[in-house]
Amino acid sequence: MKKLINDPKNVVAEALEGVALAHPGLLTVVADPAHIVRADAPVQGKVGLVSGGGSGHEPLHGGFVGYGMLDAAVPGPVFTSPTPDPIVAATKAVDGGKGVLHIVKNYTGDVLNFETAADLALAEGIEVRAVVVDDDVAVKDSLYTAGRRGVAGTVLIEKIAGAAAQRGDDLDAVTAIAEKVNGQVRSMGVALTAPTVPHAGEPSFDIGDDEIEIGIGIHGEPGRQRVGLEPADQIVDRILHPILEDLPFASGDKVLLFVNGMGGTPLIELYIAFRRAAQVLAEQGIEVSRTLVGNYVTSLEMQGFSVTVLKLDDELTELWDAPVQTAALRWGR
Amino acid sequence: MKKLINDPKNVVAEALEGVALAHPGLLTVVADPAHIVRADAPVQGKVGLVSGGGSGHEPLHGGFVGYGMLDAAVPGPVFTSPTPDPIVAATKAVDGGKGVLHIVKNYTGDVLNFETAADLALAEGIEVRAVVVDDDVAVKDSLYTAGRRGVAGTVLIEKIAGAAAQRGDDLDAVTAIAEKVNGQVRSMGVALTAPTVPHAGEPSFDIGDDEIEIGIGIHGEPGRQRVGLEPADQIVDRILHPILEDLPFASGDKVLLFVNGMGGTPLIELYIAFRRAAQVLAEQGIEVSRTLVGNYVTSLEMQGFSVTVLKLDDELTELWDAPVQTAALRWGR
Amino acid sequence: MALGREFVADWIARSAQAISEHRSELITLDREIGDGDHGENMDRGFTAVAVKSGDLPADATPADVLKVVATTLISTVGGASGPLYGTAFLKGSQAVADRAELDGAAIVAFLTAARDGIVLRGKAEVGDKTMIDAWTPAVDAAAAAQAEGRSEAEILAAAADAAQSGAESTDPLVARKGRASYLGERAIGHRDPGSVSTTLILRAAADAAAAA
Amino acid sequence: MALGREFVADWIARSAQAISEHRSELITLDREIGDGDHGENMDRGFTAVAVKSGDLPADATPADVLKVVATTLISTVGGASGPLYGTAFLKGSQAVADRAELDGAAIVAFLTAARDGIVLRGKAEVGDKTMIDAWTPAVDAAAAAQAEGRSEAEILAAAADAAQSGAESTDPLVARKGRASYLGERAIGHRDPGSVSTTLILRAAADAAAAA
Ligand SMILES: Nc1ncnc2c1ncn2[C@@H]1O[C@H](COP(=O)(O)OP(=O)(O)O)[C@@H](O)[C@H]1O
Ligand SMILES: Nc1ncnc2c1ncn2[C@@H]1O[C@H](COP(=O)(O)OP(=O)(O)O)[C@@H](O)[C@H]1O
Ligand SMILES: [Mg+2]
Ligand SMILES: [Mg+2]
Ligand SMILES: [Mg+2]
Ligand SMILES: [Mg+2]
């Protein structure tokens, strides 16, 4: 294992110290229980947005704390859901009197820990709603699974719900927007290599030099199929078609196309993937009206990428375009 | 070799198609001879800024084309300087009547090709200046080398000179600002793994599982020393001290601290490195008044990072803070 | 001989020890069909439990200790197993809240409430390839042993043996809950990590009771 | 027998062939003390040269062909070697601009001007571990052979042999120009890739002359 760390036990704590030093004025880091809040939290009269989950997916979620997006992020240990305590602390820290929305990726651990935290926050008089993100079409949503996972679509939900909260929507409305985005966004990912969790010390799965893992999760959970290494265009086609068929997306739709790097894939390769995805959408008469390319929801140093497609309407487009000022996503101010 | 590409021969061309599709409205991509220009180029009455160099360092340089930064970027093949033709084409495309500044990283190939291009542009009546960036303290600047290399400090020069051009400074003034930043910025990098150039098919150097390369370049050129893997804090100390001694930076200085990822290192690890660098500067009485953390000058999928320190004054700070709108760096609009 | 607070303390210490010794094994199992953190999560949790449960006043009851175990697990383990084991110990402690010492009936009541708590939170059934595949046979075996009038140590040994077989029974299964469910058929041939940690904890209980 | 346009065409074809055959070798050499692209750069350039030089009118002189080689190398090779080889062919072609055929004196004039062009752009001296370590001995050997009244083929063979020894002489050197200079002592024991490509091109010239 080759990592730029000191001690596997201190990875999250030391990185949080770095985050605090790198972004003063934008956010405040509380070391124990670990969470990150907007520098001006709580914003009175605004619905608070809290997200969180295991670390190792940076910039998710801490990189999205700030004006127009999240009010707080709760980082667990690497690839492990945070416990309820820091979620409760973050929820209290951002409550501006209009209630708090939890944005939770659909993993048993995240869901259970956020549920417990919501109960505890409610006991302290804070109104809490939750939206459970499940955009990953690689997992069948059936009685026989824990349901679809929450992956890169989370960023889009955090941005758009964050804009709704920032413009003053109430808790019901912000929750409804978040649910709406979750209903219209679909993702799927591919890995070329496996990530190595610091405390585990070895790669999360073994993969041959000529193999790729289709439908990979963001925690090194193996995907749904392993195939031989293929040209980029074929790989993009493999994951784009299940995405388009799932909603389904149709000719005439306007969409946001998001090609997300998993951490270890060079940006130049992400643009090659973006090119193919945009070409396929154009062929199907789907209009790409907004775009995002880069490493936003990562899996440590894993090489790979995911494609996310969100169906847009005027309202979602306007909320996407609204000003945002966070460490990882910024425009309009 | 495991890459998300189609054919090694088409990597740059296909990525440029992706860039064009991902950032319409912001920039225009010319396929042959390959270069990227601001969508609104040439901006009349503004000094034009052109940079370029081998591909594989994305987002450098194409990700910095836009309002307040570069007017054009000229990507060569992976890790290979572009030829004069596209540099001339880019120079002509951005000439708004006030002359053009070439920002050239100090490598023999880049310098020679930009020189030839400048001669050709001059022959067509365009006034061209060049600033040669050489911020890498890993290389001794002596008669016995090609001189210090241009590495991550390039981003800071492009941003600050870009802001000077955007506010209307003339060619002499923009050139002077760029020279000033180059004179006050120092960098050094470390690699944990080697990058693999698509057409080469194997890693640029061999490195053991327990070794790191100190003073690495951004093209897989080996560094000045190989040592055993160490805790992150020690690695940061190893590269930060030569940086601080070189200028030298002194107690009371205000600086911009930039921790740059080489492509394959997770953001969480970059923040651990940032933490240490900020601590050391604080101990030495150097005030970190601006910060940047992320993958800005990469070396394909290489794991590693560099530290850059720029001495600031009020003017440079103001230019750094000025609005910028590019694919990879954006604030204020 | 009914089991008192010392038993609970010894059980916790032995559990912490067993989890720490099997940390890598649990990581490896979770790496194969999950995300490779189960050993780390449980080790972090039980290390904290061992510290926290030492801080209790001298007159604390078994239930007091078990409640501290619950809240400590909830606030330190994270992941899916944190809330599940936390709820198990919380509900279990509530089921024996009035006892100064735990007799066979109390042990069965504890185990039953613990298992029910996990089901309440996680909605898993036997055969879903989760820790429930260890807990439910353990509860059944403990109840049967208690009905036969066995000692507390024998009841817990029966529970541990049944948990062990239950864990083994997960090998051929496809998972329907938790992260392994994403894998479909590819989970076949791997043991569920949570069922193994459950076995370790119940075995620690049996050993502590035998030594009491 | 002086060498005409067919010789130049054959030289180009043989150079392109040799560079293509040694592409990986040049990449490996450059990988060791540079950035691993020299074989790719030269192959891209000479492939283009082979195409472009075929497009010339029937009455083109050797200098016309050599000028196309120069501009094509400048606009396709990139890196350090592109402008250097481009300047070499440009200055060389200018030195023989007036000849319909190249005799021994013209060949020496070409080689000298080519070498001087590289020095003008790159400022390297013999011993700096660059392609100049092959060019300068080649120029000297060619001049000596021409002074002795040797044939064009013999002059070029002498140049190629000297370039070859010159390339070998770079092995023990520390580099003072180009990317290898960043390596300091670590460049010792490796051959400069540009001196090897220079040898290939001069050997191709000698072979073409011998076959003419
Ligand atoms: N819904 C559930 N009901 C019961 N047990 C579950 C459920 N989901 C997961 N588990 C148990 O949790 C274990 C995984 O725990 P752990 O690895 O610590 O958490 P995570 O899956 O969040 O990484 C599984 O092996 C399984 O026994
Ligand atoms: N200043 C110089 N003078 C002469 N030759 C040089 C100089 N710098 C580099 N070279 C030659 O160029 C070769 C490297 O070419 P190449 O790999 O194509 O370019 P780059 O170094 O830009 O990657 C070196 O092996 C050396 O022979
Ligand atoms: Mg986990
Ligand atoms: Mg090169
Ligand atoms: Mg797990
Ligand atoms: Mg090279």
Image (cartoon, coloured by chain):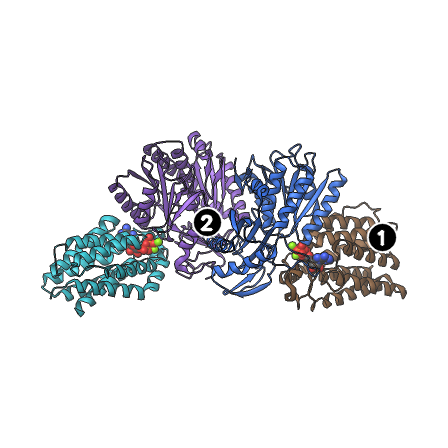
Chain colours: A blue, B purple, C brown, D cyan
Q: Which element carries disc 1, helix, strand or loop?
A: helix
Depth check: C67 or A320 in front?
Answer: A320
* Ligand 4 lies in quarter: bottom left
Say how many tags the image has: 2
Q: Are marks 1 and 2 on the same chain?
A: no
Depth check: C157 or B75 in front?
Answer: B75
Q: Which element carries disc 2, helix, strand or loop?
A: helix
Few, some or many C-alpha atoms within 10 Å of disc 2 (few <14, some 14-19, many ≥20)?
A: many
- Whether residue B197 sits left or right of residue A190 in the image: it is left
- Whether residue A311 sits left or right of residue D157 in the image: it is right
Where's residue B33, x and y in %?
34, 50
Q: Which mark is residue C95?
A: 1
> Which residue is denoted by mark 2 in the rendering?
B21
| Chain letter behind tag 2 | B
Q: What's the CA distance linking mark 1 and mark 2?
A: 63 Å
The quadrant of the image that shows the N terminus of chain A is: bottom right
**Mark 2 C-beta closer than 8 Å to ligand 4:** no
Q: Residue at x 72, y 67 (%)?
A: C168
Where's residue C145, x and y in %?
86, 65
Tell me which corner region of the image, top left, top right, bottom left or bottom right, holds residue C159. Answer: bottom right
The answer to the question of whether label 1 and label 2 lie on touching residues, with beta carbons closer than 8 A, is no
* Disc 2 residue type (three-letter): Leu
- Whether residue A76 sits left or right of residue C198 in the image: it is left
